[in-house]
Each structure stands twice: as structure tokens, then as C-alpha cells.
């Protein structure tokens, strides 16, 4: 899995580098983008649907992603694109002074449709949805024991663009399965309700700032 993710990340970096100037000059057209921002998991993040967080622990962190909007059709003042996020990386730590818990979540090749509305030659709004394979790892700094999980997740988002600048928000959802329950793992024989307890929620919200290249 690590080798596959490394190769896909390298492919994404190369594609991004090769397409930095590939966006259309018109604000409604596609092009490469890069964003970073606040990553805020829900209170029940990385808990199965059968459990709720009754404490005060919350996680906050940073998100980074880069990708490309590929224009499919333009009928000004609107357009339809394919939004491809080559790599998304999220990292968060908890707010408790007595613990050092962390959550890392990454996705490769998030894909989905994007609908864009043009307000002026310099402003536009993007609405999009995406799905992707996702890897999540949680643990505590200084402790070599960690839990890793893999699954498919979805994203619904909106972004306002002014020239090259992007400000947006995304809501991400879905569940990932504990890797110990896969293949020949120690929990692979788990079934029914016990297996449901090994599927963790990934719900979180992101507020992002970024740039879309190739714009005036």
C-alpha cells in the first residue's frame, strides 16, 4: 500500500508540474489548483457509528491538496468540469494538554463533477462533489502503537474564486475499515456488529484558501 501511494503521489506531482499553465484564461475554465487550510474533524471522528464522543476532546489541524479542474463543457456564464484532486493530506492533534493524540488522513485521486457559475470576468463560484480511496492513521506521539484504516470517502464542497484566489469550504464523509480486519489480519474473521465497530467515521469540515493557476 505504501508503495502504491508513493507512486500515485509522484504521478500527481508530475501532472501538477506539467499543467501549471494549462488552465484557460477565462475564469469559467479549468486549470491546476493548490489549497491549504483548517482541517476540523467532527466530535465523533474515527469512532464507529455505534459510539459517540461524550468527552471534551476535539481535533484541529491543517489540510493540503492540489489538483486540476478539467473543463468538459462551457455555456457561459456556466461550465461543467471534472475536478481531480491528485493528493490530499490532513493532519490534526487533540486539544488535551495531557495527551498527544494525532490523526492523519490522506486521499489519492479524488474525482467528481464540478459546476461553475461565472459572476464576472474576475469572479466565479464552484460547486463540486468527489469520491476517493482514503487512508487514515490515528495514535499518540511517542507511542509506536497506531491504528490504520482504509476505505472510500466522499466530499461535497463550494469555492468562491476571485482571479487566482480561492476561498472555500468542504464537508467530507464516509467510513474506513480497520486494516486488522482485512485479508489475514488478526480481526479478519470478525462479522456482524463487531465488524461494524471496526468501521470508523471520517466526517470533517475544511475551510481552505488557495490559488488556481493560469488565471489573469
Image (spheres, rainbow, N blue to C red):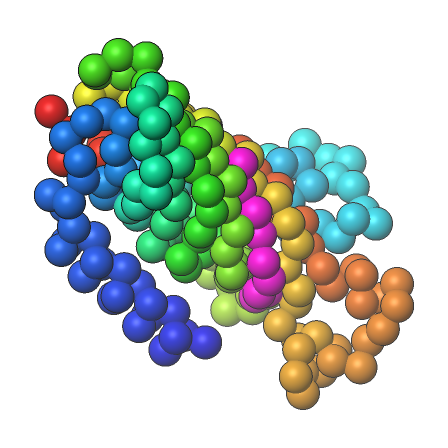
Report which quarter residue 78 is drawn in.
Answer: top left
Q: Is residue 162 left or right of residue 104?
A: left
The residue shown at (77%, 36%) is 54
The residue shown at (39%, 75%) is 4
- Residue 113 point in image, percent of width and height: 46, 42
Residue 30 is covered by the magenta coloring = no
The correct choice, above or below, for 84 with respect to 3 in the image is above
Q: Is residue 119 left or right of residue 190?
A: left
The residue shown at (33%, 19%) is 77
Q: Nearer the viewer, residue 22 or 146?
A: 22
Q: Which residues are magenta?
A: 148-156
Q: Residue furthest front?
A: 75
Q: Report the quarter where the N terminus lies.
A: bottom left
Can residue 140 be seen from the camera position used here? no
- Residue 205 point in image, percent of width and height: 53, 33
Can residue 115 be seen from the camera position used here? yes
Q: Nearer the viewer, residue 215 or 187?
A: 215
Amino acid at each position: 500500500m505504501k508503495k502504491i501511494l508513493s507512486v500515485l503521489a509522484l504521478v500527481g506531482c508530475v501532472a501538477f508540474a506539467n499543467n501549471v499553465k494549462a488552465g484557460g484564461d477565462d475564469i469559467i475554465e479549468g486549470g491546476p489548483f493548490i489549497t491549504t487550510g483548517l482541517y476540523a474533524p467532527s466530535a465523533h471522528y474515527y469512532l464507529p457509528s455505534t459510539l459517540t464522543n461524550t468527552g471534551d476532546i476535539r481535533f484541529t489541524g491543517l489540510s493540503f491538496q492540489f489538483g486540476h479542474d478539467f473543463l468538459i463543457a462551457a455555456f457561459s456564464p456556466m461550465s461543467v468540469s471534472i475536478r481531480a484532486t491528485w493528493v490530499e493530506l490532513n493532519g490534526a492533534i487533540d486539544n488535551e494538554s495531557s495527551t498527544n493524540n494525532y490523526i492523519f488522513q490522506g486521499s489519492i485521486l479524488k474525482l467528481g463533477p464540478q459546476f461553475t457559475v461565472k459572476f464576472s470576468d474576475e469572479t466565479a463560484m464552484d460547486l463540486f462533489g468527489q469520491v476517493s480511496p482514503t487512508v487514515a492513521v490515528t495514535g499518540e506521539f511517542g507511542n509506536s502503537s497506531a491504528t490504520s484504516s482504509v476505505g472510500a470517502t466522499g466530499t461535497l464542497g463550494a469555492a468562491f474564486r476571485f482571479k487566482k484566489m480561492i476561498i472555500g469550504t468542504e464537508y467530507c464523509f464516509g467510513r474506513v475499515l480497520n486494516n486488522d480486519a482485512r485479508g489475514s489480519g488478526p480481526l479478519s474473521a470478525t462479522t456482524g456488529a463487531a465488524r461494524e465497530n471496526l468501521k470508523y467515521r471520517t466526517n470533517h469540515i475544511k475551510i481552505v484558501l488557495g490559488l488556481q493557476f493560469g488565471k489573469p
